[in-house]
Image: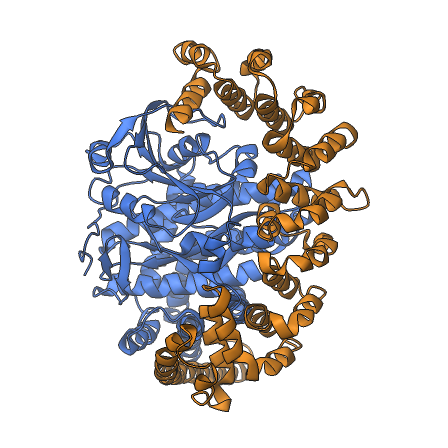
Chain colours: A blue, B orange
C-alpha cells in the first residue's frame, strides 16, 4: 500500500475518532439534560389533575387526523380507540388515501357512515377528494375518501377540512392512550406561542390490547422488536427530551404530534415530495416562524403515549430504517441554508449541525470507520491493544447511554411494571452494540445512497393488527 | 503505533473502567429505585385503603372527621393531604367541608410548603390549599398569585376561579397581564368559571385602555362565555376605537353572542377588513344581529378568498332562515356551494 493511501487511512481513523467523541458528547449532553427535564416535568405533573382539566372546559378543541392506506386489518379498531379518547371536544377525521383494500367499506359499515357535506377551511394541495362521510352514530367521526397521494398528501387533505385551532397528526395504525390529548395539549395552554408538540412513541408488540386500549405492557418476545423498545426509549427519553429542554426540537414523530392549524396552513401544510414529511414540517415551521419573526415554540412532552407496532423481521425493519434515513437526508439537504446560520438561533447553530453531520452523514463515517479500522489493524497502523481498548470504550459508552435511558424510564414514567422487563432491557443495552448497531448503520448508509439517487416512495409495512386481546 | 500510545492506552483503559463502573452504578440505582418504589407503592396502597374505608363515612356525615386523624402517621401527612385533595376536586358543599375539616391539622404544614424553594412543591401546596384550606388560608392562595413562578401563580388562579370564591375575581383580573403567555381560551374559560358575579370586574377589565389588549381580550372572551348582555355596548365602543386584531376579533365574537341591532355599524366596518379573521368574525356577528332581510347583504361575500369567511356567511344565511337560497347555492357550482351545504347540514343537525 502506498504512503499516500496509508496516510489517508490514518486521516480516516482520526475522522472516525472525532465523530465518535462528538456523537457521544452530544448523547451524554442530551441524556444529562433529559434527566433534569424529566425530573422537573415529573414534579410539575403533580399539579395536573386530568379530570379537572377535562371538567374545566378550558381545553381547546382538537381534530385528530388519521391517514389510512390499506389499513383494513386495523382501521376499525384504531378508529374505535380514537373515539374513546378522554378529551372534551374533539373530532376524528380518518382520511382514506385511495386504499386498494376494503378500508373505506369497513369504516362505513362499522360506524354507519353516510355521505355528508363539509366545506374546506384551507386550500392546501392534495389529491382530489372522492367523498366525505359522517357517522350517524358518532357525531365527531368523519371519513374523507380521496385518491392516493401518499401520507403527506393525505394529511393535507385532512388539514384542509380541519376546523379546530389544533390538530393531531398520527398514523391510523397507532393507538393513542386515553389521556394522550389532555397531556399533549398542556404546552399549548401554558404558552400561547406553542405551534407544535410531540408525544412519545412506544412499541405495542406483544402488549395486551383490549378495546383499543393497551391494558398490559410487556416487552416483545422477539429480539428485534425488543431492541427497538430500547432504541425508542433512548431516542425519546434521552434524545428528544434533551433537545426539547434546549429549545431545539427538530423532529416530531409522524405517529403522534399536535400542531397549531393556522401556522401549519400558513407554512403550506405537509410537503408531499419527501418521505420525511413529519420532520420536514417541523423544520419548515422553525424557518417560517424565524423568518417572519413570529414568536413560537416547538416542544416534546414525555408522558402522552402513542403505541405503535414495530417491524419484527430484518427485511421490513431494514426498509423502514432506509426510508427514515432517506427522509432525514431529503429534509436536511432541502433546508441546508439553516446549517450554522445564526438567524435560526439554537436550531441553526446546534440542532441542525448535529443532525446534518452526526445523524445524516454519521452512518457513512461509522461504516467507513469499521472498514478503515480493520484495515489499519491488519496493516499494523494501529496497535491491537489500543484498538481493543477503543472498541471496549465504544461498547461500554453505548451501553451506559442505553442503560441510562432505561434508568430514565424507571426514574420517571415507569411504564414497564414487571421487573424482568427492566432487567431484560438492561441486558439488551449490553447486547445491542454487537451486530444490531452495525446493521443499522449499514441500512442508514443504504438510505443515504437511495436519497442520493433520488429514490421516492414508502414501501409496504406488513401489519399483524391489534384487536381485542390480540397483540398478546 | 500512535505517538504517546502508552498514555493514550492507559487513558482508554481508565475510561473503560470508569464507564463500566458508571454503567453498573446506573443499573444498580435503577433496580434499587424499582424495588423501593414498589415497596413504597404497596405501603401507600395499604394506608390509602385504611383511609378510604373511613373517609366515605366521614363524607356521608356518619363519622366525625377527627376519626381519620388517628389513622395518619405524622410522617405521612403530605400523602394524606394529597389523598384528600384527590377527593376534594370531585365534590362540593358539605362533603368538601368534611374533607377540609379532616385536613385541618396538617394545613399549616401546607402553608410552609407553599413557600418552599421548589416551584412544583409550592404549586402542589397551593393547589391543595385551594381545595381544602380556603376557609382559613385564602390569603395564602391569593398571595401565590404574585409568586415569581408562573406555574404557581396559575395554580393559585385556578384555585380561586370558582363560583364560591367569586369575591377574589378582582384579584385575578388585576394580575391578568401576568398570565399573558397562557392560552387565551383556557384563561377565559377559567374566568368564566367564576360565574356572573365576576361580570362587573370583567367588564371593567375589557373597557380599561390601560390594560394590555391580550388581557382585555381574555376578559372579553370570558364575558362572551357568560353571555353578558351589558358587555355588548363596551364591545361596540372598542370596535369603533381599537385597531388591535385580537381584541377586535374578541369583541366581534362577543357581539355575535350578545349584540343588538344598534351595534351593527360597529360590526359593519370590519366586514371589509384586510384581515380574514376579522372579516369572518364580522360576518358571524352581522348574521347574528341583523334582521333576516339585511343578511342578504352578505351574499357577495360568498366569493371571499377565505374559506372561513365563506363558511360564516353561509351560517349567517342559515340562521336568518334563508334555507331555499342556501339549497340552491349548495346545488350549484358556485364558490360557496360546499359552505352552503355544510351550513344546511349543521342546521339539520341542530
For residue B57, side relative to residue A331 (left or right): left
Compared with A232, A103 (above or below) is: above
- Left or right, A401 with respect to A44, comes to left
Whether residue A340 is visible to the viewer of this picture, yes or no, is no
| Quadrant (top left/top right/bottom left/bottom right) for the C terminus of chain B | top left
What residue lies at 23% left-to-right and 57% top-to-bottom?
A210
State the count of labels. 0
Q: Residue at x 52, y 55 (%)?
A: A186
Nearest to the observer: residue A271 or residue B343: B343
Report x, y in % for residue A126.
41, 27
Q: Eyeballing the image, is A42 above or below A179? A: below
* Spot occupied by residue B200 in the image (x, y as percentages of width and height): 71, 46
Q: Is residue B51 visible?
A: yes
Q: Position of residue A470 (x, y in %)?
A: 17, 56
Q: Position of residue A124 (x, y in %)?
A: 48, 28
* Residue positioned 63% across, 34% down in the render: B254
In the foreground, A101 or A224 = A101
Question: Could you say which quadrant of the image residue B45 lies in?
Answer: bottom left
Near-viewer residue (A25 or B132): B132
Q: Residue furthest front?
A: B62
Amino acid at each position: 500500500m502506498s504512503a499516500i493511501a496509508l496516510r489517508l487511512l490514518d486521516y480516516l481513523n482520526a475522522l472516525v475518532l472525532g465523530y465518535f467523541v462528538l456523537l457521544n458528547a452530544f448523547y451524554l449532553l442530551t441524556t444529562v439534560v433529559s434527566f433534569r427535564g424529566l425530573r422537573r416535568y415529573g414534579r410539575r405533573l403533580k399539579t395536573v389533575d386530568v379530570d379537572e382539566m377535562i371538567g374545566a372546559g378550558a381545553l381547546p378543541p382538537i381534530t385528530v387526523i388519521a391517514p389510512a392506506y390499506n389499513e383494513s386489518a386495523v382501521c376499525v379498531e384504531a378508529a374505535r380507540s380514537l373515539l374513546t379518547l378522554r378529551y372534551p371536544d374533539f373530532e376524528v377525521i380518518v382520511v382514506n388515501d385511495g386504499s386498494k383494500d376494503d378500508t373505506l367499506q369497513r369504516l362505513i359499515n362499522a360506524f354507519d357512515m353516510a355521505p355528508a357535506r363539509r366545506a374546506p377551511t384551507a386550500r392546501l394541495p392534495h389529491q382530489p377528494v372522492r367523498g366525505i362521510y359522517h357517522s350517524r352514530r358518532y357525531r365527531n367521526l368523519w371519513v374523507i375518501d380521496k385518491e392516493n397521494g401518499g401520507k403527506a398528501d393525505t394529511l393535507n387533505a385532512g388539514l384542509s377540512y380541519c376546523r379546530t385551532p389544533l390538530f393531531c397528526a398520527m398514523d391510523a395504525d397507532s393507538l393513542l392512550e386515553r389521556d394522550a390529548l389532555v397531556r399533549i395539549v398542556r404546552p399549548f395552554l401554558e404558552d400561547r406561542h406553542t405551534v407544535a408538540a410531540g408525544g412519545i412513541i412506544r412499541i405495542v408488540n406483544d402488549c395486551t390490547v383490549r378495546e383499543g386500549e393497551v391494558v398490559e405492557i410487556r416487552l416483545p418476545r422477539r429480539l428485534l422488536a425488543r431492541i427497538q423498545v430500547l432504541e425508542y426509549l433512548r431516542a425519546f427519553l434521552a434524545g428528544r427530551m434533551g433537545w426539547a429542554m434546549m429549545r431545539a426540537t427538530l423532529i416530531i414523530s409522524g405517529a403522534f404530534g399536535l400542531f397549531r392549524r393556522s401556522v401549519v396552513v400558513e407554512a403550506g401544510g405537509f410537503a408531499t415530495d419527501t418521505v420525511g414529511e413529519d420532520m420536514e414540517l417541523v423544520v419548515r415551521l422553525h424557518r417560517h416562524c424565524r423568518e417572519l419573526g413570529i414568536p413560537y415554540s416547538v416542544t416534546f412532552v414525555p408522558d402522552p403515549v402513542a403505541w405503535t407496532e414495530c417491524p419484527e423481521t430484518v427485511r421490513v425493519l431494514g426498509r423502514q430504517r432506509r426510508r427514515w434515513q432517506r427522509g432525514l437526508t431529503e429534509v436536511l439537504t432541502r433546508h441546508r441554508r439553516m446549517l450554522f446560520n445564526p438567524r435560526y438561533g439554537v436550531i441553526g447553530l446546534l440542532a441542525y449541525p448535529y443532525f446534518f453531520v452526526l445523524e445524516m452523514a454519521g452512518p457513512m463515517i461509522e461504516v467507513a470507520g469499521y472498514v478503515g479500522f480493520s484495515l489499519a489493524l491488519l496493516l499494523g497502523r494501529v496497535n491491537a491493544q489500543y484498538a481493543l481498548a477503543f472498541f471496549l470504550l465504544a461498547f461500554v459508552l453505548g451501553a451506559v447511554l442505553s442503560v441510562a435511558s432505561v434508568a430514565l424510564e424507571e426514574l420517571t414514567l415507569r411504564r414497564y411494571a414487571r421487573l424482568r422487563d427492566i432487567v431484560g432491557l438492561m441486558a439488551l443495552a449490553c447486547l445491542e452494540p454487537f451486530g444490531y448497531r452495525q446493521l443499522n448503520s449499514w441500512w442508514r448508509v443504504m438510505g443515504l445512497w437511495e436519497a442520493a439517487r433520488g429514490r421516492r416512495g414508502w414501501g409496504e409495512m406488513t401489519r399483524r393488527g391489534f384487536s381485542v386481546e390480540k397483540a398478546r | 503505533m500512535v505517538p504517546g500510545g502508552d498514555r493514550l492506552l492507559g487513558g482508554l483503559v481508565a475510561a473503560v473502567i470508569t464507564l463500566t463502573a458508571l454503567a453498573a452504578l446506573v443499573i444498580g440505582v435503577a433496580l434499587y429505585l424499582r424495588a423501593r418504589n414498589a415497596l413504597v407503592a404497596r405501603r401507600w396502597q395499604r394506608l390509602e385503603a385504611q383511609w378510604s374505608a373511613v373517609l366515605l363515612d366521614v363524607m356521608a356525615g356518619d363519622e366525625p372527621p377527627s376519626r381519620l386523624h388517628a389513622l395518619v402517621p405524622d410522617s405521612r401527612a403530605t400523602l394524606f393531604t394529597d389523598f384528600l385533595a384527590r377527593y376534594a376536586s370531585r365534590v362540593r358543599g358539605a362533603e368538601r367541608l368534611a374533607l377540609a375539616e379532616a385536613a385541618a391539622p396538617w394545613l399549616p404544614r401546607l402553608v410552609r410548603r407553599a413557600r418552599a424553594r421548589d416551584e412544583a412543591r409550592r404549586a402542589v401546596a397551593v393547589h391543595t390549599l385551594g381545595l381544602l384550606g380556603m376557609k382559613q388560608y385564602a390569603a395564602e392562595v391569593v398571595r401565590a398569585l404574585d409568586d415569581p413562578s408562573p406555574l404557581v401563580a396559575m395554580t393559585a388562579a385556578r384555585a380561586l376561579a370558582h363560583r364560591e370564591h367569586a369575591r377574589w375575581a378582582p384579584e385575578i383580573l388585576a394580575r391578568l397581564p401576568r398570565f399573558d403567555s397562557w392560552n387565551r381560551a383556557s384563561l377565559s374559560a377559567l374566568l368564566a368559571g367564576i360565574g356572573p358575579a365576576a361580570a362587573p370586574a370583567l367588564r371593567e377589565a375589557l373597557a380599561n385602555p390601560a390594560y394590555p389588549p391580550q388581557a382585555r381580550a381574555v376578559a372579553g372572551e370570558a364575558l362572551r362565555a357568560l353571555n353578558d348582555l351589558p358587555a355588548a355596548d363596551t364591545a361596540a365602543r372598542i370596535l369603533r376605537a381599537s385597531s388591535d386584531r385580537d381584541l377586535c376579533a374578541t369583541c366581534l365574537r362577543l357581539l355575535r353572542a350578545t349584540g343588538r341591532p344598534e351595534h351593527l355599524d360597529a360590526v359593519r366596518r370590519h366586514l371589509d377588513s384586510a384581515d380574514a379573521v376579522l372579516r369572518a368574525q364580522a360576518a358571524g356577528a352581522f348574521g347574528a344581529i341583523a334582521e333576516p332581510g339585511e343578511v342578504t347583504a352578505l351574499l357577495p361575500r360568498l366569493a371571499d378568498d377565505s374559506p372561513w369567511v365563506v363558511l360564516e356567511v353561509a351560517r349567517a344565511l342559515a340562521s336568518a332562515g334563508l334555507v331555499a337560497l342556501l339549497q340552491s347555492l349548495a346545488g350549484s357550482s358556485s364558490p360557496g356551494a360546499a359552505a352552503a351545504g355544510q351550513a344546511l347540514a349543521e342546521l339539520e343537525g341542530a
